[in-house]
Amino acid sequence: MYIPFEQMANHSRVWVYCASRSFSEEEKTWIISKLVAFCNQWNTHGSLMPTSFDIQYDQFILLLVDESKMGASGCSIDSSVRVLREIEQHLNVEILDAGKVAFLSEGRVEVVKLHQVGSVIQEGKLKPDTPVFNPSVSRKGELEEKWHIPAKESWLSRYFQKQKITQ
């Protein structure tokens, strides 16, 4: 059953999906209607779960489930992936590809493929203090403090260490 994002408990499980580009207002309206309908029927083993979603920065889809009474099953998670795949296909955008890095540059979200990280660092677009989006957050409460972290505090730190060694 759909519950507004703001009303979801901080312990709710969250999955963060980054789109390869920003969504237009028209696309966001379509996504919202699709996800409200999905959340209203999202269930595990036939029982409805308290669920929600949010679209942030016009580019991230966050899906939430309050697992305090029952956890999301493999089948229920698969159903969420199916709806995201439908969104991808309908809008011709990558959402499920995890091989992306997202960071803030001059207040805008930049998304690059993993193989581009080294060159983006060399160009100076991605620096140790650049806020990156941490895809490993797993609870709604972590979004406040752990979703945006400096690149040097993320798995990207090895790129900056390598850069220091070669200088």
Image: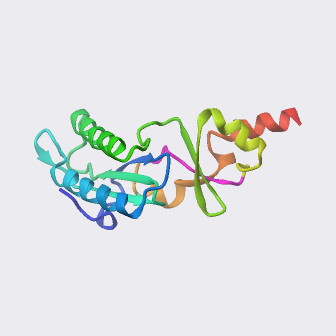
Looking at this rendering, what residue extends furthest in the left direction?
A: 46
Quadrant in which the N terminus appears: bottom left
Question: Residue 70 colored magenta?
Answer: no
Looking at the rendering, the stretch of residues picked out in magenta corresponds to 129-137
Quadrant in which the C terminus appears: top right
* Quadrant position of residue 109: bottom right
In the image, residue 156 above or below residue 105: above
Q: Position of residue 101 (x, y in %)?
A: 57, 43
Image label count = 0
Look at the image and name its color scheme: rainbow
Magenta-colored segment: predominant secondary structure: loop
Q: Position of residue 17 (x, y in %)?
A: 42, 46
Q: Which residue is drawn at the image coordinates 32% and 52% (left, top)?
A: 64
Q: Is 13 situated left or right of 166 in this image?
A: left
Q: Is 158 situated left or right of 64 in this image?
A: right
Q: Is 91 situated left or right of 133 in this image?
A: left
* Quadrant position of residue 33: bottom left
Q: Which residue is drawn at the image coordinates 42% and 48% (left, top)?
A: 16
Q: Which residue is drawn at the image coordinates 32% and 60% (left, top)?
A: 9
Q: Position of residue 71 (x, y in %)?
A: 24, 43
Looking at this rendering, what residue extends furthest in the right direction?
A: 167
Residue toward you, 120 or 69: 120
Q: Position of residue 100 (x, y in %)?
A: 54, 40
Residue toward you, 43 or 9: 43
Residue toward you, 24 or 162: 24
